[in-house]
Amino acid sequence: MDRHGTLKFILTLVVVLLAFGALYIMQGTMNSFYIRVLNLAAIYAILALSMNLILGFTGMFSLGHAGFMCIGSYVAAILTMSPASKQIIYYMVPIHPLLANVEWPILPAILLGGLVAAFFGFLVGFPALRLRDDYLAIATLGFAEIIRIIVTNTISITNGALGLKNIPSVDSLLVYWGFAIVTIFVLMRIINSSWGYAFKAIRDNEIAAQAMGINIFKHKLMSFTIGAFFAGIAGALMAFLITSIDPTMYRFTFTFQILLIVVLGGMGSLTGSVIASIIFAIAMEWLRFVEQPMNLFGLAIPGIPGMRMVIFSITLLLVILFYRQGLLGTREINWEWILTRLGIKNSLEAKRGEAN
């Protein structure tokens, strides 16, 4: 490793340690509401990063994220709920005997939720990824709705439309942002590897990528499966954050929220997705007042449910019309960018040239 690479490694290690230290301090000093918003931002970040891998870096227009998230949520919730809670909640139809006395630790349940989602992503991707553009979007959207319908009707496993309650609660910033940081690190490693270069080549021009010897289908399937895995992880974390889930949470409209974040941050930018996720989570909470009844200059205005999403939809339209690349476009805020801005990279290269 050269001096430049060593410097980037040390800086990354220092930033990660400082980030975890800051999260630890914030956990003890911030109130529960702000902690919940930040945890929600971490979940949105994982979802946006995974969708950006599929859409922004590989160029596949997939709308199945809500389905993968649903799988991760239900797998993690069912595995971690206590037998006593299951007995109370499954009062319409008893839970399946194989699941009645299962109670896993939270971390393995989260990972298994991601793995099961990745397995279904592989199964769905095998036939669906032979389609392109709008046809792929329709196929993946249909998959997400099929998953939701199956969850609604397999009452002995998922408790059907009644959903699951009394899911173990996790409110630690270290857990949620720990998973988000790991997701960022893993996806950055993938994007900067030969696999990532192949993804971007497929996105830019499939015919040219195939002519270069890239196996189009294999790389698409790999990208889709990895994206499904992290969507499942985010779904599991969501279950532990809100402690109550039901099939209506995973309608296709949720996928469009994640798509909005990806477009806002920039398709093809991981750091853009993270920044947009934080903005989205904070703004969604701050804009709750627009859905409440208010008195404006003596004029009584009734609360209108869903106005927050209307505002964000208008924002998305403005971004598409006037700033199509989003906040960062395809740029990344990484050490290359920071060191170049500070002039350190040029200095190191000059010293290396003198040494040679």
Image (tube, helix red, strand yellow):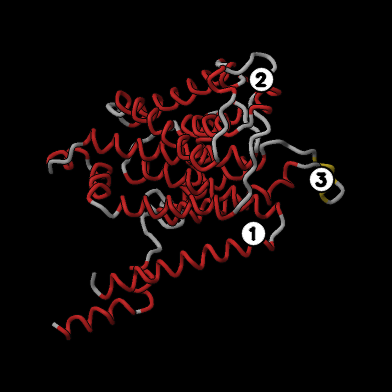
User: For the point 51% across and 53% down, which residue is it?
Assistant: 276
Q: Which residue is mark 2?
A: 90
Residue 202 occupies quadrant: top left
Q: Residues at badges 2 and 1 in contact (C-beta under 8 Å)?
A: no
Residue flagged by tag 3: what amino acid is it?
Answer: Met
The quarter in which the C terminus is drawn is bottom left
- Above or below residue 18? Residue 263 is above
View extreme (bottom): residue: 354
User: For the point 53% across and 50% down, which residue is it?
Assistant: 277
User: For the point 64% across and 25% down, which residue is it?
Assistant: 163
- Circle number at residue 294: 3
Residue 23 occupies quadrant: bottom right
Residue flagged by tag 1: what amino acid is it?
Answer: Gln
Residue 289 versus residue 54: which sits nearer the camera?
54
> Dot 1 surroundings within 10 Å: few (below 14), some, or many (20 or more)?
some
User: For the point 65% across and 37% down, which residue is it?
Assistant: 243
- Above or below residue 260? Residue 166 is above
Front label number (1 vs 3): 1
Q: Which residue is mark 1?
A: 27
Mark 2 or 1, nearer chain start: 1
